[in-house]
Image (cartoon, helix red, strand yellow):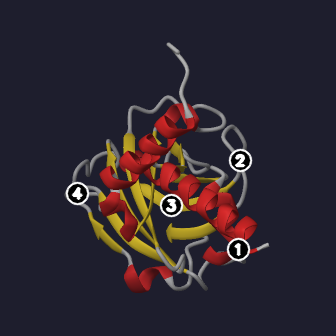
Amino acid sequence: MRGMITGKVLAGMAAGTLLAASPALAGIKFFATIDESQEVPVRGSDATGTALLELNDDKTALSIHIVIEGLDFDGLQTPDDALDNVTGLHIHRAPAGVNAGVVFGMIGPSHDTHGDFHLEIDGLTATITTVWREDEGNNTTLTDELPFLFTQGLYINVHTQQWTGGEIRGQIVPEPASLALLGLGSLIALRRRRTNA
């Protein structure tokens, strides 16, 4: 019938998604669009950013790659404007529209004690790369924060000299292909449990 999706079609779609996303089997991918509209309260900033994150298969390390436009990481791009200098870059735990404490710090106050070991900042391209490992965090660990990562309960906040509480922010969300793979994996696990019961 027109407009109806049968179980076979759904299974075919899931298989197609799995095949199309096979490179994603290397890990579970997340992203964040970072801008002023997500800050609480909203700021008047033109700065923006994008974050790509990948959780390894063992769920023991989250690779983080962030690119920011319109802010200064080393003071060289806009030496006459100290207000746009990044003073902090963190992951916080809270749903969209709510502020909360730091769970993983990359730059500035509340930075993770391990963070400097594998943090790379390219001031010229405003690119930050790091890895959040399973036993690291600000009074927590990556392992403890995984449930919040999977339920969009973590966000990236970029703090500046002008906006010490945060100038731009982005909620971390799963990429659709990774979300489909997670759902398929859960379905397979559920069927195996029922078969073994």
Q: Amino acid at mark 1?
A: Asp
Image disc number at residue 67: none
Q: Is residue 66 left or right of residue 30?
A: left
Q: SS at mark 2?
A: loop
Q: SS at mark 4?
A: loop
Image disc number at residue 144: 1
Instruction: Assess disc 3: are there few (<14), some (14-19) or many (≥20) residues with their C-alpha within 10 Å of its C-alpha.
Output: many
Q: Measure the alpha-carbon separation of dots 2 and 4.
A: 31 Å
Q: Are marks 4 and 3 in contact (CB under 8 Å)?
A: no
Q: Is residue 5 above or below residue 169?
A: above
Q: Are marks 2 and 3 in contact (CB under 8 Å)?
A: no
Q: Determine the residue positioned at 47% across, 35% down.
A: 9
Q: Is residue 122 above or below residue 160?
A: below
The reply to whether residue 54 is in sight is yes
Among numbered discs 1 and 2, the one appearing first in the sequence: 2
Instruction: Assess disc 4: are there few (<14), some (14-19) or many (≥20) residues with their C-alpha within 10 Å of its C-alpha.
Output: few
Question: Could you say where residue 18 lies in the image, as x and y percent from the top left?
Answer: 39, 54
Image disc number at residue 99: 2
**For discs 4 and 3, the disc positioned in front in the rendered view:** 3
